[in-house]
Image (cartoon, coloured by chain):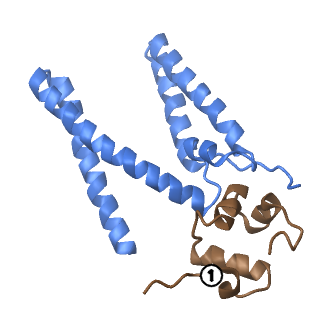
Amino acid sequence: MSKKSYSRISTTNIILLSSLAAGAIVCLILQNPMGAAFLGATAFLSLIAIIPNLRSDARDIGRINAIQYRDERDRKLARAGFSTVGASALILGVVLAVASAISGIPLFQALAFGQLFVLAIIWGVANGVVVRRG
Amino acid sequence: MREASGLSQGSLGDALGVSRQTINALETGRYDPSLTLAIRIARHFGRTVEEVFHVEEEL
């Protein structure tokens, strides 16, 4: 019988939760209670989803979904999953950019093309890094 | 080898710093470990990597 232990919250989750909490605080300062409630609830629900997966006996699918990797297999499986997410994000980004161009709404166009541009930069940098690491 | 040592998948995983599921995936051939993990497993049992892992050569 192995003893149950808990891992710490991953750096990725700390960044995500901090961003949501900071956004909620900014919304409160800007007197946008709906935005604050939405972001605060998202942070709270995310934390509720993460906590059970800190246990050493958590299921692998739970840890991977919660971005709480325990070992090299978790990271390998997560990379495979995220590669699908990345390819899907690029396709959806192009679809969104096309839709924004048709709409003619300047803010929509700026956000859609900005997102596509950032995704393309990340794609190029990520490919460069993995090729260098061989 | 693990069972002969009286270890559960969970306790071996804890000893090696990996999950129970990873030990299960290794034992059932669903996961090939990194060289680092393969060496750690072999050292844990006092064996060589070749004694623990068997590779079917493809010609």
Q: Nearer the viewer, residue A9 or B24?
A: B24
Q: Which chain is the one coloured blue?
A: A
Residue B38 point in image, percent of width and height: 64, 77
Residue positioned 75% across, 86% down in the render: B47
Say which quadrant the N terminus of chain B sits in.
bottom right
Instruction: Please tell me whether residue B26 is drawn above or below residue A8 in the rendered image.
Output: below
Under mark 1, the amino acid is His
Instruction: Please tell me whether residue A97 is drawn above or below residue B18 in the rendered image.
Output: above
Instruction: Please tell me whether residue A65 is drawn above or below residue B20 in the rendered image.
Output: above
User: How dense is the environment of label 1, judged by Cα within 10 Å: few (below 14), some, or many (20 and up)?
Assistant: few
Label 1: element kind:
loop
Q: Chain B colour? A: brown
Chain of the residue that carries numbered disc 1 in the rendered image: B
Say which quadrant the C terminus of chain B sits in.
bottom left
Residue positioned 72% across, 81% down in the render: B42
Q: Nearer the viewer, residue A103 or B20?
A: B20
The residue tagged 1 is: B54
Residue B4 point in image, percent of width and height: 86, 73
Horizontal side of A87 relative to A35 (left or right) equals left
Horizontal side of A71 relative to A117 (left or right) equals right
